[in-house]
Image: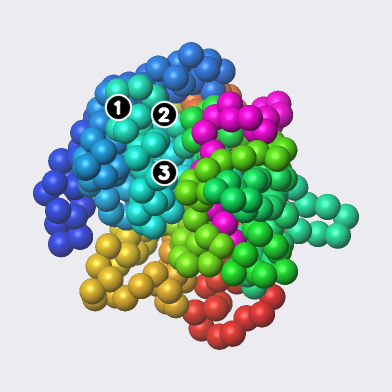
Amino acid sequence: MIKDYALHFPPVLITEEQQTLHKAVHDFVNREIIPIRERLEDEGDLQQKVRKLLVDIGLQRLSMPKEYGGEGIRGTLLNALICEELSRGDVGIAVSLMCTGWAWKPAISGNIKAVLDRFMPDFCGDKVQIGCFAMTEPGGPHGGGGCDIENAVYRGTKLRTTARFEGDECVVNGSKLWATNSGIADLYCIACTVDPKLGEDGIVLAYVPKKWPGLTVGPDEKKCGLKTDHNCPVYFDDLRIPGEWSIGPGGKAAELFWAQLPGVSSGAMATGIMQGIMETVLEYTGQRIVADKPIREHGGPAETLADLAMETELARTWYLTTAYMCDHPEIYGPKKGFLAARMNMARITSEKAVRCAEKAIQLMGSYGYVREYHVEKYWRDSLMITLWKGGTRLSRHNVCRAYYDLEI
Ligand SMILES: Cc1cc2nc3c(=O)[nH]c(=O)nc-3n(C[C@H](O)[C@H](O)[C@H](O)COP(=O)(O)OP(=O)(O)OC[C@H]3O[C@@H](n4cnc5c(N)ncnc54)[C@H](O)[C@@H]3O)c2cc1C
């Protein structure tokens, strides 16, 4: 029998309300996602059905402001707990939901009334509404794009998508790549600049609804994993929006842009993957007999299982304590310095998820490599968490910055 070990969290970190919500999402994932997860990758209709169920259980509007019909329940820790649970079922579904919140974060934190009034009520309704935060751009022969935009050292000078203000309007030109939910989003938050030479002072965050004149999308990227997360190029050709749908240049725009980058949720997603791996491999190795006894009764495999359990618990402890610190600025201060380093470290645990998946595949032999048992999917999906937001390499640079001035 597999014990329900994952549900025991230290009450000092997690409130009763958070525990209740967590348990509801845990049960939801067991009931609605795990039984169909093998088909989710291939069937767009099924993905949409799951998204609708997330709306029905209130997750889409959970963190949205109360005055627009949301629940107004915000917080890094709760968000991370939900991320872990959804990722145990399907990390792409978790990413898609989280990126809707991500797209909204600058408008909510900056209290951008024109954007909130116009678009928020729909996101608090009972229809699926999807958001996209688009920052990454194509690189070029002279660099830029990709990691350079996410690299704090460049301070926004590598952005190439431009915002030009004409009267009451903001005119956007350029293109974005890879953003989660691109192509299926109802609302885009586009990171752009009035002039890259101005660096942070030039940053603008512009909100654009889907099918807006001047906005076009390219074909879906064909990725090896994370297939329930949709990504495609997005183009802006003299796209005009009311100026009040944008933030910046100046003011809090740069702060809101950089606040998008470190994230505990990637660590929570990695933990969800590890938890899912653990559940699958425990069950399989308990059933499959080799050399006259279940795989997990052999010394070597038992030790590997202990390692998997330990890595999972370490990753969980790390993201939980870091999220708790983020939610208590009165004790731990703003998300800068060492706290920012902790957030980056939480995301580096995604490398552990990749290794756990590999170890699990080894434990399961050929069956670890087939879709039926899902561990190969965890492996494909976990790799992506190590790559986005500048990759674990830039995360490591950001960790170093808490200890010394690193100018690379
Ligand atoms: C599934 C998926 C979801 C995504 N979601 C979003 C999203 O929602 N919004 C969004 O804006 N973007 C998103 N992205 C884009 C993602 O954040 C970028 O792809 C990623 O940050 C890296 O950019 P790149 O792929 O262009 O890599 P590149 O910039 O080409 O970098 C390649 C590698 O070079 C190395 N490198 C880069 N810079 C340095 C340096 N300074 N020092 C040493 N080594 C370095 C790193 O190892 C890096 O991994 C997503 C991508 C995918 C595939």
Instruction: Say which element carries label 3.
Output: helix
Q: Which mark is residue 129?
A: 2
- Place residue 180 in its image quadrant: top right
Q: Position of residue 146 (x, y in %)?
A: 69, 53
Say whether marks 2 and 1 touch (CB < 8 Å).
yes
For mark 3, does the 10 Å Cα neighbourhood hold few (<14), some (14 to 19), or many (20 or more) residues?
many
Q: Earlier in the sequence, mark 3 or mark 2?
A: 3
Tag in front: 3 or 2:
3
Tag in front: 3 or 1:
3
- Residue drawn 49% across and 79% down? 402
- Residue drawn 27% across and 50% down? 74
- Place residue 215 in its image quadrant: top right
Q: Is residue 182 visible?
A: yes
Magenta run includes residue 225: yes
Amino acid type at circle 3 is Val
For mark 1, does the 10 Å Cα neighbourhood hold few (<14), some (14 to 19), or many (20 or more) residues?
some
- Residue drawn 25% across and 27% down? 57
Amino acid type at circle 1 is Gly
Q: Disc 2 to disc 1, how far (Cα)?
A: 9 Å
Q: Which residues are magenta?
A: 203-227
The residue sitting at the left extreme is 16
> Residue tagged by mark 1?
125
Q: Disc 3 to disc 2, how far (Cα)?
A: 15 Å
Q: Is residue 4 above or below residue 167?
A: above
Q: Position of residue 291 (x, y in %)?
A: 48, 31
Q: Which mark is residue 115?
A: 3
